[in-house]
Amino acid sequence: MDVNLVLRSTRVITPEGTRPASIAVSGGTIAAVLPYDAEVPAGARLEDVGDDVVLPGLVDTHVHVNDPGRTEWEGFWTATRAAAAGGITTLLDMPLNSLPPTTTVENLRVKQDVARAKAHVDVGFWGGALPDNVKDLRPLHDAGVFGFKCFLSPSGVEEFPELDQERLATSLAEISGFGGLMIVHAEDPHHLAAAPQRPGGAYADFLASRPRDAENTAIENLIDQARRLDARVHVLHLSSSDALPAIAAARAEGVKITVESCPHFLTLTAEEIPDGATEFKCCPPIREAANQDALWQGLADGTIDCVVSDHSPSTADLKTPDFASAWGGISSLQLGLPAIWTEARRRGHDLTDVVRWMSTGPARLAGLDRKGAIEAGRDADFAVLDPEATFTVDPAELQHRNRITAYAGRTLHGVVTSTWLRGERIVDQGVLAEPSGRLLERNN
């Protein structure tokens, strides 16, 4: 065992719990998790981070990088820098908001070519399921995408139309035929069309325009389709806690369904959003505090599998004061870990829970068997966190291309002091190294 690095801490989060340990790294892979006072092998470098907590690098499976085509919104260089600064070592890019969208193998290759030299962290790609690209799904799967994203209501960009129930069934049947995964923006278009649509700056009006029933009905229909077709499905960015009992019941009967939520749904509430503050706009929307409490219960009992960012940035001019016309998306790639840790600790959770939600769970969803845990045989990806330190969010200090954030001015717990990718330190006290991320394909 040719160990070149030993990373030591009094608090290392392993699958067996948190303990003092020395992590031996060989060639970018975790060779062993040793006792804290283990002898450092000859020729290995010791990095002792003291009492800072060593977490497995976070995995964010829901990121809109928008590159190429809308790089003024975001790009692989800036998005992956923000990820690294926030302790994320792997991200999966969503297939829309870039031009072209990731809906053919040719388009996937365009995106990979753009990302290759810019990635500060490891990057994989979701494919897209559109009404007219069923023929492209198997080739995309064979080319290494991690699954397929679809919308059940309008996506907000014309090049990525939604699936009606008939086309959803057709795509699901195709994807389940080769053992793939469909990830779904689940809002029912009929409920959205029937909801009151009032333009203006009142957040209460925007919330009324995206009712919980739109999510609940779409998820119930998705469960029915998944059950009938024996398909694997994943519910994206769950906002309505009302849907949790149906999801739990479906899973108990053997339906292959998983679900995620996002930092903004778990840390921000409708009651605190000022009118006109469209940096808080996303779809589905941030709901009331009582709904948030129920989402946290879903995390605690395991109904919600993971917490990922749904980082969906835009230029500042698209965040108009009118909730009806403003771009819907929240930028939180760099802030997800401290935002969730701040609320988790307040609610009595510990960092092992955060690791399960933000590293192990997303890695399992995507089938990234080298990510998501500190144990022998995994990639030596780490986030080193001072969990007691606090900071106040200053948008000017973010790595995102457009420094608009719903967290501006908030004081959060948890400072990422360093981030490591395959045994190399890529962030050190906020200073980023040159890009060294790799492009990932399914089953790598």
Image: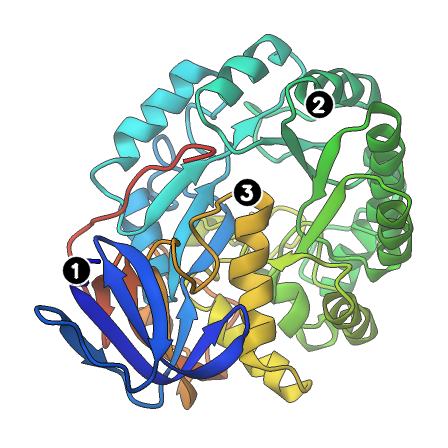
Task: Work out how far the residue at label 1 is from the one at label 2, CA to CA, in angstroms.
Answer: 41 Å
What colouring style does the render use? rainbow
Closest to the camera, between mark 3 and mark 1, is: 3
Residue 308 visible somewhere in the drawing: no
Numbered disc 1: secondary structure = loop
Front position in the image: 174 or 101: 174
> Which residue was labeled with disc 2?
176
* Mark earlier in primary sequence (3, 1): 3
* Residue that extends furthest to the left in the rendered view of this protein: 43
* Horizontal relation, residue 279 to residue 425: left or right: right
Residue 245, horizontal then vertical, whole percent? 90, 57
Q: Residues within 10 Å of mark 1 (few under 14, many from 20)?
A: some
What amino acid is labelled 2 in the image? Ser
> Which residue was labeled with disc 3?
366
* Residue that extends furthest to the top in the rendered view of this protein: 135
> Which residue was labeled with disc 1?
433
* Horizontal relation, residue 136 to residue 117: left or right: right
Residue 440, horizontal then vertical, whole percent? 37, 37
Front position in the image: 182 or 51: 51
Q: Quadrant of residue 352?
A: bottom right
